[in-house]
Amino acid sequence: MGRTMSFYDLRDAMAQPGCPVCRLMAAAVEHYLDTLLWENVNDAGARQQIRRARGFCNQHAWQLVAGGSSLGAVIITRDVLQNLLRLLEDAGFQAPAVSLRRRAKHALEGRRPPPANAQLVAQLGPQAPCPACAQAETTEEVLIATLVEGLLGDDGLLPAYRASEGMCLKHFRQALSEARSPAVFEALVDVQRTKWQQLVEQLSEIVRKEDYRFRDEPRGEEVGASLRAIAALCGPRASAK
Amino acid sequence: MSRHISFHEVKGALALEGCPICRLTAEVVERYLDFMLWERVTDPDLRREVRQARGFCHEHAWALVRAGASLGIAILLQDVLQELCTALQDSTAQQTGHARRSRRGIRGLGGSRPAEDVVNALSSQLEPQGEQRCPACVQRQTMEDIYLDVLLDNLVGKDNLAAIYQASDGLCLPHFRRAVRRAHSQEILEALLQAQLAIWQRLVQQLGEVIRKNDYRFQDEPWGEEAGAWLTAIATLVGPQPRRGTK
């Protein structure tokens, strides 16, 4: 059976700590941001996309400058801010779209009236998703599909998956919704249950060894389980600045 | 005019770097997480909230990490993972039953696909339950609304904060959007827009200066207040970098 590049990327990532899908998505975003900064800052299409998204999301905006100051990041953020300034220059007050009666009722009940300035609020919001998130999402879809399709069969990913730390909760849910056969569904659930049970046991061991009666026992594989549990539930820590 | 303590908190935060609401709510969340880890780990209500939310959001889960917190984190997250394991066990039993019924021909279809109701039930069990959100996000949002209203209510009138606000780094874009939504009079919106416009114009000028000084003709000129503008601009658009927690 012919295998795609993603299959081998996944197999390699499964030998590393943490969720393999998260790891490969992070690598894809890193590559995208690098290319943007060094090759595409003056690309009209990329700039338009970033302007419409009102810049990047919090995580990817900080990742953009993780390597230090760059002229590219300054050019991009100035462009977004200039665009926002134009919106403010043309802005005017827009009362909440409710009747006078309802506004009086809100005032009598001491409640804040419904949102005002709806048009300006909408214009200031993203008109498109964060471009790095969009890139990550495309990679994510390909990886999940590859994992589910390549899990079973000769030379499938199952042994590597079984030996890995398993997927994070979000990607496990996505993989389940892509599972097209009971065998794949059962394999996914079986491996993930084993991983989570191991983690629960390690967390129990941390709790036990905090007891004064057992606190002198040497630490074993439970060291770091609190961090692995966080990563298992919500993905890896964002890359450092 | 008597002022509430939040007024003085907002005023104090305006004198410091960055979005004042981000700064104040980060402090609130930090106190909340500290209090939770050291005082409330065995509180049944909190444990239920955390279980139902399926833990914390990404930002606040990693913000839990601090010296000496591994026991608290282990207790809270063991609880969540145990509940998830139970959901997996239940779905395995249901799927086995479904496969057996399919083999016996009780259900003509579905032998080659996992039972849709089993997959759907498991997927929804793995998600946050009901309306429950990350408990730290709930806390943050409550305080954000309070601080934003204090800022807006004091942008006009006697001894207002407009001048201090205009001299500050201003609100970040996400908080500015929420402030615009909560500005319920023309006077307040105008004061807010005027100040924010001045702040962003200042920042755009500083960014222009950074770009100019990257030109080989001017690169030997000394750097002034524009030196940190590239970081201020990022924080203005998306808020500060989340606290990373400590090992």
Image (tube, grey):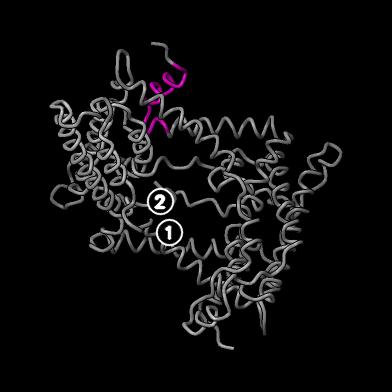
What number is the disc on residue B57? 2
Q: Which residue is mark 1?
A: B137
Label 1 resides on the chain identified as B
Point out the residue furthest to the right here: B217
**Crowd band around label 2 with a 10 angstrom C-alpha radius: few (<14), some (14–19), many (20+):** some
How many numbered callouts?
A: 2
Say what amino acid the circle numbered 2 marks. Cys
Q: Is residue B240 magenta?
A: no
Which quadrant of the structure image shows residue A85?
bottom right
Instruction: Report the residue at 33% width, 40% height from top.
Output: A228
SS for callout 1: helix
Q: Does residue B66 appear anywhere in the picture?
A: no
Q: In this rendering, would A19 be left or right of B179?
A: left
In the rendered structure, are the residues bearing label 1 and label 2 in contact, judged by CB atoms less than 8 Å apart?
yes
**In this picture, which residue range is highlighted in magenta?**
A4-21
Q: State whether residue A155 is above or below residue B144.
A: above
